[in-house]
Amino acid sequence: VAMGIDIDKTTFEAADFKAFGKRLEQNLESLQALLTRPGFGAGPASMGSEMEMYIVDASGYPLYANEEIEEEAKDTQLTLELNRYNLEYNLSPYALDQSAFAKTEAEILAKLQQLRGVAARHGGRIVPIGILPTLRKTDFGPHCITRRRRYHALVEQLIRRRGDKFHIEINGDDPLKLELADITLEGANTSFQVHYRVTPGNYADTFNAMQLLTPLAVAISANSPTLFGHRLWQETRIPLFKQSIDTRHTDRYGWREPARVSFGQGWARRGAGELFQEVVRIYPPLLPVCSDVSPSQEQTDAVTPSLAELRLHQGTVWLWNRPIYDDAGGGHLRIEMRALPAGPTAIDMVASAAFMIGLAEGLRPRINDLLPAQPFAIAEYNFYRAAQHGLDARLLWPDAGQSGYRERGVMEIASALLPTAWAGLRAIGVAADEADHYIGIVEQRLERRQTGAIWQRRMLARLRESMPLQSALHELLEIYMTHSEANTPVAEWPL
């Protein structure tokens, strides 16, 4: 999970936190001024994305070679991740009315091919998958952390706040219970993060629509059904990420500090400003490093404020849908959708992104009729149920004319909303054939009841009939990689 910009120190004094807190307040003031400026953030809708990947060796085990591959690739869009066997590729942003989805898919395929060439020279292979099936417990711990100050500082701060071991407890067919001394298990999760540029005027409604539909997107895209051979949730990344860096000690009858990995605190009421404020007000800083240039200096120089401290702080709060400010091009706002897993293929990742953006735009005009029927706690409930049960999940979905609740299956809800997603894509300038193509990929998954997670579970069961668990997990990965590299939509993968 992307941890952002690097920093130059790893230990902090009380004075650092104080200075950083003061800067955060100045950042919020600058942001507020920007948000009231006429024309700020206006511009065409665009999409960018970040794809996280595993590096594995010839046997399918994690290969600790991200620094070597990054150095040889000499590609500014390639960045390192927390663990030595993960990489992230920052894909180019594309305007939505200029084939953004098709261009993103083409770029993913080109970059994967390029990276596979570099990795091969280090005895490695590249695979986009939510959680690698062949991970061992020995692949976690201080020895697997990428040598960047930022990561070591973050690990240290989270451990200090926790004060003892991190507890992992995930239910499923083979429940998993673990205790870890650090946060490196967080690096087991690889995702496909989608950035969608939104104008300030539409921000709250679009953000709320995105929150509402995220459970559906998780269910139709699930690709992380196992960890250490345990069959857990369809999208095991969701509970694993939350628990692997949870520094809270809870008292059942006391108040609970909000988790740093969360679905959010409630519907957005006014706009983007409150979402940024929330992150500052609720979460204490972990990396109090101030930029060389103060917000008042930027104002004097009449440059677009960088809001460096706010952006650094936000990089240590992992909301599943996160508000993003970027100073590029006079400054603009985005929604970062962080719940989609990496893989199984380029075409599947892009189709899931198209479904999310299309459905958010399709629901946005009537979102304020739907929200009274959906308390935020129910949306959050849906999110965890979708991650747990995937296409078999039963959710509570709002209906403008409803009175009371009834559960409905994800398949029924998502199928009924495909035309809304298609219309939403058309409304933001996506060509009809492009919308048809990518929404069709999602429709096919629903028709065939097959996601990456369902395929992995079925394939593993098939392989277990003739071989022990460890061999089956390795064989599963090899078959997965063959289909993934061919870019065949996962709904068509044979068993």
Image (tube, rainbow, N blue to C red):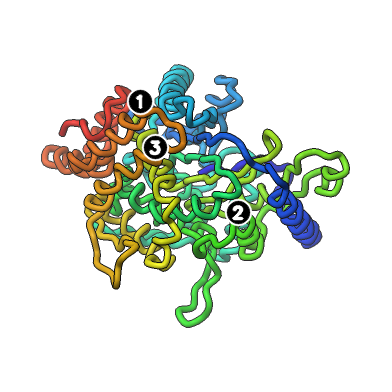
Q: Can residue 134 be seen in this view?
A: yes
Instruction: Looking at the picture, tell me which residue is in the foreground, 375 or 72.
Output: 375
Instruction: Looking at the picture, tell me which residue is in the foreground, 463 or 136.
Output: 463
Q: Distance between the residues labelled 2 and 1?
A: 46 Å
Q: Which of marks 3 and 2 precedes in the sequence?
A: 2
Q: Are marks 2 and 3 in contact (CB under 8 Å)?
A: no
For image coordinates 50% across by 48% down, the residue present is 184
Above-or-below relation of 342 to 406: above
Q: Name the residue under label 1.
A: 58
Q: Mark 2 points at which residue?
A: 272
Q: Distance between the residues labelled 3 and 1?
A: 34 Å
Image-based side of 369 in relation to 443, left or right: right
Q: How many residues crowd around disc 3 within 10 Å: few (fewer than 14), some, or many (20 or more)?
A: many
Q: Which of marks 1 and 3 precedes in the sequence?
A: 1
Q: Mark 3 points at which residue?
A: 354
Q: How many residues crowd around disc 1 within 10 Å: few (fewer than 14), some, or many (20 or more)?
A: few
For image coordinates 55% across by 49% down, the residue present is 202
Residue 285, quarter of picture: bottom right
Kindly identify the amino acid type of the residue bearing the numbered disc 3. Answer: Ala
Q: Can residue 16 be seen in this view?
A: no
Q: Distance between the residues labelled 2 and 3?
A: 23 Å
For image coordinates 35% across by 32% down, the residue present is 435
Of all residues shown, which one is farthest toward the bottom?
A: 253
Kindly identify the amino acid type of the residue bearing the numbered disc 1. Answer: Ala
